[in-house]
Image: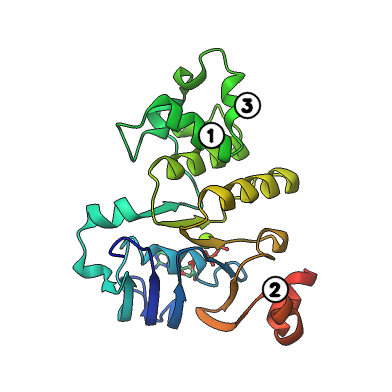
């Protein structure tokens, strides 16, 4: 139970250091193991900022972020890293082989574990097609792979660490709709007991989420399932129609 992966934001308000006004105000929600929580909202709404508080890239000004009931500022950073994988909006690859990049969070992972993660992340075939497979070199910043390949490698990197909580920040945006759907179906199968929080731009990515939080100007203005929000949320309807 100590490693369940329950995420709770409790009345969280956050401002960037030196900034006058908060970018997040009074954010409360709970994400439990087995659930997918989606966050949607226009650019600048605060989605990335919201995710950044769980791995403690920043700490809130007010309120609490809890992991399994423990405020994250009382947890060891290494402990958080073991339990929480964040796939950032601008996924980063460094100069080295694909294998090096995939083992970034877990140096002792076997090749088989890397291939398993690539299979889920829909990256298995393009890596296999490369002459040197896992030993193929990635140039600094990953400029010799496409945006969609970079996203899939970074998703695979997160899978390799087998965390309790996955944070995906717009991680499917560079994928075509079919690959996005295949990837999420595979992800759902392999991470069925993990807690998943997905920031997305595309509605099709999140229609099956257990709960969708509609973020506007740093506040959760509406929440519910896709069907519920279609009925109740003008902000959500606007996003769907855009
Ligand atoms: P998109 O990724 O474009 O969809 O936006 P988002 O919803 O992820 O918004 P984000 O959380 O990145 O930004 C919310 C607000 O915080 C915006 O007004 C940003 O300008 C501001 N912001 C983001 N990062 C920083 C930062 O590092 N410092 C400061 N001072 N402000 C920031
Ligand atoms: Mg963002």
Give the structural element (helix, strand or loop) at label 1: helix
Q: Residue 157 location, x and y as percent?
A: 44, 40
Which type of secondary structure does the marked residue at label 3 adopt?
helix
Label whose residue precedes the other's in the sequence (3 or 2): 3
Q: Position of residue 161 (x, y in %)?
A: 38, 43
Rendered image quadrant of residue 72: bottom left
Residue visible at 39% across and 69% down?
A: 6
Which residue occupies 34% across, 41% down? 105
Query: Picture coordinates of residue 65 (x, y %)?
Result: 33, 74
Q: Is residue 30 left or right of residue 216?
A: left
Q: Earlier in the sequence, mark 2 or mark 1?
A: 1
- Which residue is disc 3 drawn over? 125
The figure's colour scheme reads: rainbow
The structure residue drawn at horizontal position 58% and vertical position 21%, both measured from the top left corner, is: 128
Determine whether the residue tagged by mark 2 lies in a helix, strand or loop: helix
- CA gap between label 3 and label 2 equals 33 Å
222 vs 167, left or right, is right
Q: CA distance from mark 2 to mark 1?
A: 29 Å
**Image quarter of the C terminus:** bottom right
Residues 139 and 102: in front is 102
Please tell me which residue lies in front, 68 or 235: 68
Question: Badge 1 local density, few (<14 within 10 Å), some, or many (20+)?
Answer: many
Q: Is residue 117 visible?
A: yes
User: What is the distance, in whole Å, between disc 3 and disc 1 at their CAs?
Assistant: 8 Å
What residue is pinned by disc 1?
A: 118
Note whether 186 is above or below 80 in the view shown: above
- Whether pointer 3 and pointer 1 mark residues with C-beta atoms closer than 8 Å, the reply is no
**Relative to 42, 9 lies left or right:** left
What residue did someone put label 2 on? 226
Q: Give neighbour class at mark 2: few <14, some 14-19, many 20+ (Cα, 10 Å).
A: many
- Asked if disc 3 and disc 2 are in contact, CB closer than 8 Å, the reply is no
């Amino acid at each position: 139970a100590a490693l369940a992966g329950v995420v709770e934001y409790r009345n969280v308000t956050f401002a960037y250091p030196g900034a006058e006004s908060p970018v997040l105000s009074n954010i409360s929600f709970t994400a439990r193991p087995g659930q997918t929580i989606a966050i949607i909202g226009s650019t600048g709404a605060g989605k990335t900022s919201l995710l950044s508080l769980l791995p403690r890239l920043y700490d809130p000004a007010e309120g609490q972020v809890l992991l399994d009931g423990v405020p994250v500022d009382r947890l060891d950073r290494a402990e958080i890293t073991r339990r929480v994988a964040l796939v950032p909006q601008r996924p980063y690859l460094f100069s080295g082989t694909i294998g090096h990049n995939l083992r970034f969070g877990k140096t002792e992972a076997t090749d088989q574990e890397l291939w398993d993660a690539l299979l889920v992340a829909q990256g298995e075939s393009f890596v296999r097609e490369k002459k040197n497979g896992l030993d193929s070199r990635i140039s600094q910043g990953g400029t010799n792979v496409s945006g969609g390949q970079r996203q899939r490698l970074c998703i695979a990197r997160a899978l390799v660490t087998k965390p309790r909580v996955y944070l995906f920040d717009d991680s499917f945006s560079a994928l075509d709709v079919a690959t996005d759907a295949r990837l999420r179906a595979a992800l759902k199968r392999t991470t069925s007991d993990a807690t998943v929080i997905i920031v997305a731009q595309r509605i099709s990515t999140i229609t099956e989420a257990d709960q969708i939080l509609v973020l506007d100007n740093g506040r959760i203005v509406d929440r519910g399932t896709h069907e519920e929000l279609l009925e109740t949320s003008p902000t959500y309807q606007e996003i769907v129609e855009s």
